[in-house]
Image (cartoon, rainbow, N blue to C red):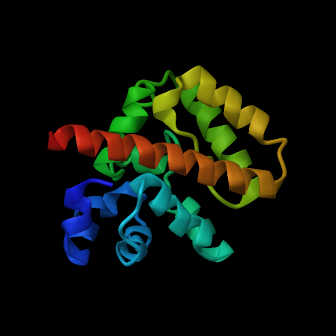
Amino acid sequence: MSRDAINLSSEAFVERYGFLFEHSPWVVERAAARRPFADLHAGLMQVVLDATDEERLGLIRAHPELAGKAAIAKTLTAESTAEQASAGLDRLTEAEFVRFHDLNAAYRTRFGFPFIVCVRMTDKAGILDAMGSRLAHSREAELATAIGEIGKIVRLRLADLERESR
């Protein structure tokens, strides 16, 4: 953990890192009280693991569907907009858009939450393949996978922030 993160007030810590978890600053708020961490990412993710099942489900549900209504309405967070664009989700063909829409609907119907994947680590084809194959998983497996993918997203966002701070 950087010296800056250790020395920040709780309010400044939340202000600096609160965006890491999509519409869920409660994770960083709780982490602020647990500092210092040997590893900031691990400390943040431990807060998620220590949360209740309902809180983890809320964290998952705070994420937008990929190429979904929020993207079309341009109401995604700046981070999600950039991340979805990095995978080409802002440049879908009509057929790709329909496929994403159908898979998003099937996934949400089956599991009750949006499909989560770290889009910066894949591309459109990889995302579509994962959406299709993960529909066969159990709900418990998908909950765990979603939290793991959120961890990857947070790790990359944290790395970006640290790079920008240099």
149 or 80: which is nearer to us? 149
Residue at 64% x, 75% y is: 54
Q: Position of residue 118 (x, y in %)?
A: 52, 38
Task: Specify the quadrant of the image occupied by residue 58.
Answer: bottom right
Classify residue 131 as left or right of residue 74.
Answer: right
Q: Position of residue 140 (x, y in %)?
A: 79, 58
Classify residue 75 as left or right of residue 140.
Answer: left
Extreme residue toward the left, this view: 166
Classify residue 157 as left or right of residue 64.
Answer: left
Q: In this view, does 114 lie above or below 129?
A: below
Q: Position of residue 49 (x, y in %)?
A: 61, 66
Task: Specify the quadrant of the image occupied by residue 147.
Answer: bottom right
Residue at 59% x, 74% y is: 51
69 or 76: which is nearer to us? 76
Question: Is residue 65 visible in this depiction of the protein?
Answer: no
Q: Quadrant of the N terminus?
A: bottom left
Q: How many labels does the image show?
A: 0
Classify residue 75 as left or right of residue 149.
Answer: left
